[in-house]
Amino acid sequence: MIIGFMRDSNPMLRYASCHAIGQISDDMQPKFQEVYGNTILPELINLLNDQVPRVVSHSAAALTNFLEGMKWEQVQGSLQQLVTLLLEHIGKGISLVKESCLSAISSVVEVAKENYAPYLENTVRLMFDFFENEKYSSK
């Protein structure tokens, strides 16, 4: 039922569905991810392309919780797309989106472990850029 709301034309419903997924993921892991991981992960990744920054931010936040209960085998096929989108938002998104995507990256690294190595250099560079820019923008 929640997946239908993730595809709704109303951004408030897409946002709320991400919130629900994030909460359920946290409360019912890892069983929730074992049963619904292959269905929900692509939907959350798809919402990283949303036109509404709050939806993108909440999708990344839901991914943070959702990925914590995932196994590598479930994430493996989506890793490149997931990392590419998250890093893209960290590089050019608004601060609300950047912060959620940084948290999601940490969950991706945790589940991918050594498989994250090809993305590490780019990730570290973007993180240094993020922290350097945030340091100057907060003055």
Image: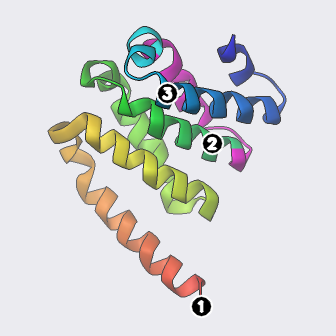
Q: Please report whichever mark, 3 or 2, sits nearer to the chain's N-terminal start.
A: 3
Q: Please report whichever mark, 1 or 2, sits nearer to the chain's N-terminal start.
A: 2
Q: Magenta part of the protein: which range?
A: 37-54
Residue depicted at 39% across the width and 42% down the height: 83
Residue 8 x %, y % = 78, 22
Residue 27 got which mark? 3
Amino acid residing under circle 3: Asp
| Vertical relation: 115 (above or below) 5 | below
CA separation, marks 3 and 2? 17 Å
Residue closest to the far front? 27
Return the residue nearer the eye: 120 or 11.
Answer: 11
Tell me the chief SS of the magenta region.
helix
Residue 67 x %, y % = 40, 32
139 with respect to 106 (left or right): right
Q: Which residue is mark 1?
A: 139
Q: Nearer the viewer, mark 3 or mark 2?
A: 3
Residue 58 got which mark? 2
